[in-house]
Image (cartoon, rainbow, N blue to C red):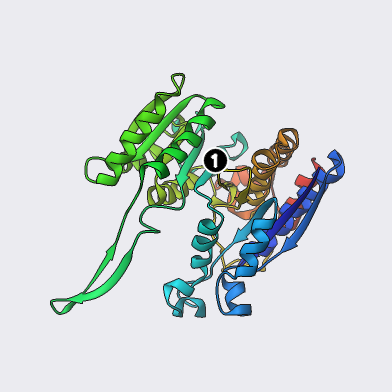
Amino acid sequence: MQANIVCIPGDGIGPEIVAEAKKVLNKVAAVYGHEFNFEDVLMGGASIDAYGIPLTDETIAKAKAADAVLMGSIGGDAKTSPWYKLEPSKRPEAGLLGIRKALNLFANLRPAILYEELSAACPLKTEISEKGFDMMIMRELTGGLYFGERKTFEENGEKKAIDTLTYSESEIRRIAIKAFDIAMKRRKKVTSVDKANVLDSSRLWRSVTEEVAKDYPEVTLEHMLVDNAAMQLVKDPAQFDVILTENMFGDILSDEASMVTGSIGMLASASLNDTKFGLYEPSGGSAPDIAGKGIANPIATILSAAMMLRFSFDLDKEADAIEKAVKKALKSGYRTIDIMPQDEDERASVKQIGTARMGDIIASNI
């Protein structure tokens, strides 16, 4: 097949890790007889430097015209970067919110898997990590607190700020359907996370999810309050299959899930709309402190590219090949610095390598 992929390298380590994902995709194309055409565009801090705004109409238009978007990372050091002296609507992260809205990317899929080879990097107790885990976090991406009305004003002589959390039935239903569809292909369990003991929006979330569940009798649905879910993720992550939750809760829980895998550099993600179109990116940040040093972990971006093949292009065999190539690299003892074992004896049995070398090895395993 032939596919046109818009790439947003972004900021910090973004260009480095996107380059390795392209390398692996080009190897897939060569082995399986496909043609992937890449076009780079600017967003985030790079776009601010070039155009004065984090997201241009041209970038949106090119993304809409593509078959999929592959992205690196957006943003910089909030303490030192001049981007963060700008008002919030003009900062790099505003580009992220803007493109998600423009492309109607309402469903964010974040798999969190503990690879057997990385169990030593897992910060959890051995009796927990040895059970392993494989979960999919389904985060609603275009509603909730991040997109609600907000204002800061002065009242009775002091500043006051208001952020509005809003969800409609249709917004909840469409993400719930995605979650149950994916659960049907996995272990057939959905854990819906909310704060229904306090929030009206969560009570609506719970009731709509229960309605959707009636159409999936084979799937077990359970509800869990978000504070308990945060605790259970470190107490017994193996219990989870698909976690369904709203925007802010999903933002927090998916980062927590990434760290119990051993490194945020291992966590891929896909953001989908109602069609086959999706935006694929690693869940980690731009890591400006290590940008340009050649030590960033490209695996999350490479696994995001595998998700792109699977969800946007229906190339399951090719996606499997990438995932197997990653596992082979890990089994062969190759590690970037973030997933090196803490134990000295275990460190002696693996090989620490850099960003480009990891990409080379994974590509060679295709």
Figure label count? 1
Give the quadrant of residue 33: top right
Of the pair 325 and 242, the residue shown nearer to us: 242
Residue placed furthest toward the left? 156
Q: Residue at (48%, 41%) from the top-left corner? A: 138
Q: Residue at (52%, 30%) from the top-left corner? A: 181
Residue 224 seen from this side: no
Of the pair 294 and 189, the residue shown nearer to us: 189
Asked if residue 360 lies left or right of residue 148, the reply is right
Residue 263 at x, y percent in the picture: 54, 49
Quadrant containing the C terminus is top right
Of the pair 263 and 155, the residue shown nearer to us: 155
Asked if residue 167 lies left or right of residue 22, the reply is left
Residue 361 at x, y percent in the picture: 78, 47
As drawn, 128 above or below 284: above
Q: Secondary structure at mark 1?
A: strand
For label 1, count other residues whose C-alpha is less than 10 Å away and answer few (under 14), some (14-19) or many (20+): many
As drawn, 112 above or below 57: above
Q: Amino acid at mark 1?
A: Pro
Q: Residue at (47%, 34%) from the top-left corner? A: 177
Residue 188 seen from this side: yes
Of the pair 81 and 10, the residue shown nearer to us: 10
As drawn, 41 above or below 166: below
Residue 188 at x, y percent in the picture: 49, 24
Asked if residue 43 lies left or right of residue 236, the reply is right
Disc 1 target residue: 111
Residue 43 at x, y percent in the picture: 60, 68
Quadrant containing the N terminus is top right
